[in-house]
Image: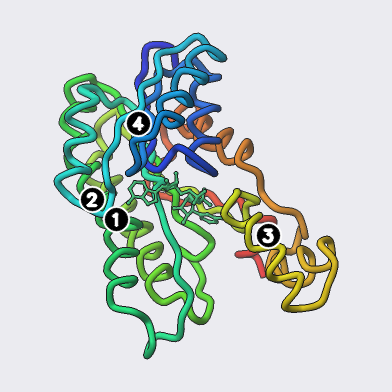
Amino acid sequence: SLKGKTAIVTGSNSGIGLGIARELARAGADVVLNSFTDRDEDHALAAQLAGEFGVAVRYIQADMSKGEECRNLIAQAGVCDILVNNAGIQHVSPIDEFPVEKWDAIIAINLNSAFHTTAAALPMMRAAGWGRIVNIASAHGLTASPFKAAYVAAKHGIVGMTKTVALETAQEPITCNAICPGYVLTPLVEAQIPDTMAKYNMGRDEVIKKVMLERQPSKEFATVEQLGGTAVFLCSDAAAQITGTTISVDGGWTAL
Ligand code: NAD
């Protein structure tokens, strides 16, 4: 059980981050939810999780594109036993047309934020004598696709940083690993289905299997619950000697 541990999950008011926050809460951890917004529903989500699992849940607004706000998130939480670097965005464009501001935003949110949160959280983990860092990379942290230069660069970058942090903490009761999901049916991905159906003149099932899951041999989406379960496993005693590595949850994508 993760009772008594506090987990900070960046970018956790939807999708994979929320799924991971839910499974950590189910395992008994207190949770800090985060995004860049500060809406009533963000705080309501925290109250709902707290009620459902009987743990303490707070929502802290912080923009992961800004280094100082990343560090402030950890400072404001005051304690960080488990850090899940999940916040991420995507933009698809050929590299010679890639908007500079999109490149900068993707590198800032998908890569730099994890540098800042990790730097701020490690002293707290050392003081507590225990820590787990779980970076949400991607199959695109291990392989590439055209038109995703910034995303692939950021995700390969976070896999590299994961290894370095693991080496720097290797003789401490702290681990640092990356989870590499394939396609996950988050609201973000769900929203792309109608347009893709129209573009290819295909039905929902056909567009999912033939277009979206083209590179995912299982032809099934990974789920946010499965990613949450993987994060909980990395926080368990069984995973104490797993550090500096990646766990793919991608239906066989990287075996191809
Ligand atoms: P999502 O859009 O549902 O969730 C992204 C989260 O990040 C949201 O909570 C959003 O509010 C937050 N976020 C965005 N910009 C932020 C900012 N500036 N500051 C703070 N929070 C911010 O997408 P998702 O699919 O759940 O993606 C989560 C992570 O998983 C990302 O790192 C993504 O690259 C990775 N991933 C997703 C898939 C997939 O198929 N969905 C596959 C591999 C990896």
* Residues at circles 1 and 4 in contact by the CB criterion of under 8 Å: no
Measured from the top left, where is residue 70 in percent x and y? 22, 43
Q: Amino acid at mark 2?
A: Phe
Q: Which residue is mark 4?
A: 8
Q: Amino acid at mark 1?
A: Met
* Image disc number at residue 252: 3
* Image disc number at residue 161: 1
Q: Nearer the viewer, mark 1 or mark 2?
A: 2
* Residues at circles 2 and 4 in contact by the CB criterion of under 8 Å: no
Which badge, 2 or 4, is on the more N-terminal residue?
4
Which badge, 1 or 2, is on the more N-terminal residue?
2
Q: Is residue 56 left or right of residue 164?
A: right
Which badge, 4 or 3, is on the more N-terminal residue?
4
- Helix, strand or loop at mark 1: helix
Q: Which residue is mark 2?
A: 115
Using the rendered view, name the quadrant where residue 56 is placed.
top left
Q: Nearer the viewer, mark 2 or mark 3?
A: 2
The answer to whether residue 237 shows anywhere in this view is no
Instruction: Report the coloring of the rendering.
Output: rainbow
Q: Amino acid at mark 3?
A: Gly
Q: Is residue 4 left or right of residue 216?
A: left
Q: Residue furthest front?
A: 40
Measured from the top left, where is residue 179 in percent x and y? 49, 48
- Helix, strand or loop at mark 2: helix
Q: Is residue 249 left or right of residue 132?
A: right
Measured from the top left, where is residue 54 in percent x and y? 50, 9
* Residues at circles 3 and 1 in contact by the CB criterion of under 8 Å: no
